Amino acid sequence: MIVCTAIKKVSRKCKYAVLIGLLLSVLAWKASFTGDTNRTIDDNFATTQTEEDKLRDELNSRIAEASHTNISAEKDECPEKSPLLVGASKLTFESSLNLKDVEKENKVVTKGEYEPSDCKARHSVAILIPHRNRERHLLYLLHHLHSFLQRQQLHYAIYVIHQAGDATFNRAKLLNVGYLEAIKDFSWECFIFHDVDLVPENDHNLYICDQQPRHLVVGRNVTGYKLRYKGYFGGVTAMTKDQFFQVNGFSNNYWGWGGEDDDLRVRVEQQKMKIVRPPANVARYTMVFHKRDSGNQVNKNRMRLLRQTTKMWRVDGLNSCVYDTLSVGRYPLYVNITVNIGQPQS
């Protein structure tokens, strides 16, 4: 009986030992499987990380290559003297010319603005043209002026400032408006104040600004290509943005023909600036014939106003130019700004 009891105890211990052994085997197998799985995950992660690194390196390389390509693709600055200049040209004013013809000739112009395609322009210039009832003159000017400016390899835009209504014409105030509106579009370095009836004959007469204000009309056909009078500063003038701001622009009070350009000359002289001109054989213009416009009579007050310039220039000009912009049309060849500039004071 005692023997049997002992055998049963041993048998029970063996069962426990077997169970413990099986349990340890399972744990060992699971540990081995988990280790393999972790190693697989680690290997996969390492592979993925390596692939991402390669992709990132390749992307960075392409970005660097693209940046280098863009830098290489930047246009060189245009030469100081344009190779496209031809000098004096024979001007024609065909009665059959129409706006569509001029647009076809200037497909490179977009909304009145042009930049050279093969080089970076050295100068950015805004051309300001005061206008009313001079459509034919404007057409002739656009026909010649666009090609003239393109041969000079300029970045330019042409602004036509149209006076609405039938009040007496005010060229000076329209040019103030043109300046104030143009600087909303771009930080133009140079402004050319240009009469609509004057067409340049020689593209060596550069439409650029200088350290001093420039007068570009030394002579015209109707004056035998001589300066109209000593001190004349009208027709076509060039001033930097800062120069024009420094003199407070034109006076707003010259209604009708005459006086406003002499007023501007006095303002320039007040600021100790000196007017410079191109050579007489280059600064030549053809004036397109026209009769005196209705609404642009000779200004009988011009001499009285001129005597007041030295006292009034600080308060009469850009800082007092009040107007209503009625429309801004961006046409293929120019920007048309139509404004109401009010009436002359009675």
Image (cartoon, rainbow, N blue to C red):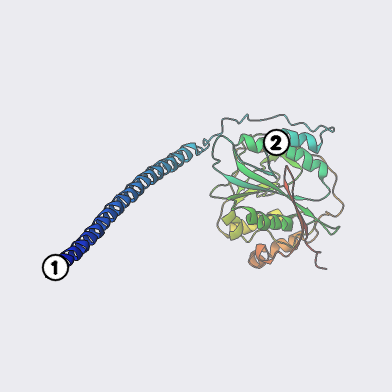
Residue 207 position, x and y percent, is: 62, 42
Instruction: Determine the residue located farthest toward the left in the rendered image.
Output: 3
**Quadrant location of residue 107?**
top right
Q: CA distance from mark 1 to mark 2?
A: 115 Å
Instruction: Determine the residue located farthest toward the front in the rendered image.
Output: 1
Total numbered badges shown on the rendered structure = 2
**Which disc is residue 100 wearing?**
none
Q: Is residue 290 left or right of residue 181?
A: right
Residue situated in front as seen by the camera: 12 or 253: 12
**Quadrant location of residue 109?**
top right
Kind of element beneath mark 2 = loop
Quadrant where the N terminus sits is bottom left
From the image, tell me which residue sits under label 1.
6
From the image, tell me which residue sits under label 2.
107
Q: Is residue 225 visible?
A: no
Q: Which residue is located at x 61 percent, y 52 percent?
A: 186
Q: Which residue is located at x 66 percent, y 46 percent?
A: 157
**Kind of residue at disc 1:** Ala
Residue situated in front as seen by the camera: 268 or 307: 268
Quadrant where the C terminus sits is bottom right
- Asked if disc 1 and disc 2 are in contact, CB closer than 8 Å, the reply is no
| 224 up-or-down from 326: above or below | above
**Marks 1 and 2: which is nearer the front?**
1
Q: Is residue 155 visible?
A: yes
Q: Which residue is located at x 56 percent, y 41 percent?
A: 121
Decide: few, some or many residues near mark 1? Use Cα within 10 Å; few <14, some 14-19, many ≥20. few
Please report whichever mark, 1 or 2, sits nearer to the chain's N-terminal start. 1
Residue 241 position, x and y percent, is: 59, 54
| 24 up-or-down from 71: above or below | below
Q: Is residue 150 left or right of residue 132?
A: left
Residue 215 position, x and y percent, is: 63, 46
